[in-house]
Image (cartoon, rainbow, N blue to C red):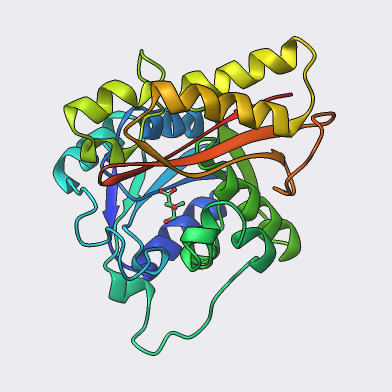
Amino acid sequence: MDMQILSTANALADCCRSWHREGKTIALVPTMGYYHEGHMALMDKARTLADRVVVSLFVNPTQFGPNEDYQSYPRDMERDTAIARKHGADALFAPTPSELYAPDAGTWVEVPEMGQLLCGVSRPIHFRGVCTVCSKLFMLSQADYALFGNKDWQQQAIIRRMVRDLFIPVTIVGVPIVRAEDGLALSSRNVYLTEEERAQAPEIYKGLVYAKTMVEHGETRASVLREAVLRRWSSTLPLGRLDYLQVIDSASLEQIEDVCGPATMACAIRMGKARLIDNIQLR
Ligand code: PAF
């Protein structure tokens, strides 16, 4: 069966409804395109979970702030279509913004407390846009599974909370971060890095691994872990400007003082035009 390319909300809903009528399960991979191996891992995992795979490709305007990179966000529909096909998508949903947002659309889905933490401090409307578009995609596809990369840890935790709170009948599946050989987490935004920035960027992950090693050696104080990583970055990452580095409860995203249960160290670093996020599970 060749991959279907769908551009309207009705076409997606009709397609998924007919699959469900045939008793097929559906996995949804929501993306903004410009695919790298991280996206491919999501598609490959989706293929193993469900009978049918829908990949959505939509650069969602509502999750970009007024001074962010919505216009310049990298796009390559032709290459992305070929990759989705190769990685087993049964349908690629690529709508226009006006297809998903009526001119007078005024309904938002928001998890305000979690959405204002971490990335939400510098991107206050970001997660409202993410939750709103994901709700639309979940509603239209009625997917049994939806797959999200662990790199956007906050996004995934917020989506899990939204799905729980609204009783949306979809299972959220997290997929491990895919990294370049030198450790840099793959991101469509890595194309913004200059050669010099790209050479330094793997230090972000090395800092996080350093903290995890400290935990493995018995350190549990979040402040000590944080200071150690910041000290290391001050010499290894001079081109980076810290947005945040926090030790958080992996599910609630709240800052913690002691690493005793499931804990994540999460960061955002600005390097030139890029803002890079990464995280590591400390325990
Ligand atoms: O992670 C992304 O690429 C986007 O935030 C998502 C989940 C596709 C929603 O637009």
Residue at image coords 21%, 48%: 74
Q: If the image is split into quadrants, where does the N terminus sit?
A: top left
Q: Left or right: where does residue 65 sit relative to residue 242?
A: left
- x, y (%) of residue 257? 79, 38
Residue 29 image position (x, y, % from top left)? 45, 44
Observer-nearest of 25 and 214: 214
* Residue at horizontal 40 percent and vertical 30 percent from the top: 38
127 relative to 264 in the view: left or right: left
Farthest residue, direction bottom: 104
Residue 228 appears anywhere in the view: yes
Q: Image quadrant of residue 95? A: bottom left
> Where residue 215 sits in the image (x, y, percent)?
73, 18
**Rendering coords of residue 208 (x, y %):** 56, 24
Q: Is residue 75 above or below residue 283?
A: below
| Identity of the residue furthest to the right in this view | 260
Using the rendered image of the protein, determine whether residue 134 is visible from the camera's viewpoint. Answer: no
Work out whether 208 lies above or below 222. Answer: above
Report the front residue among 224 and 256: 224
Query: Is residue 18 depicted above or below 46 in this figure?
Result: below
Whether residue 108 sits left or right of residue 38 in the image: it is: right
Give the answer, above or below, for where 100 lies relative to 126: below
Q: Give the residue drawn at x 42%, y 22%.
A: 235
79 or 253, which is in the foreground? 253
- The residue closer to the viewer here, 243 or 282, is 243
Question: Left of 240 or right of it: where is 24?
Answer: right
Quadrant of the image containing the C terminus: top right
Please tell me which residue is depicted at 49% across the width and 51% down the height of the picture: 19
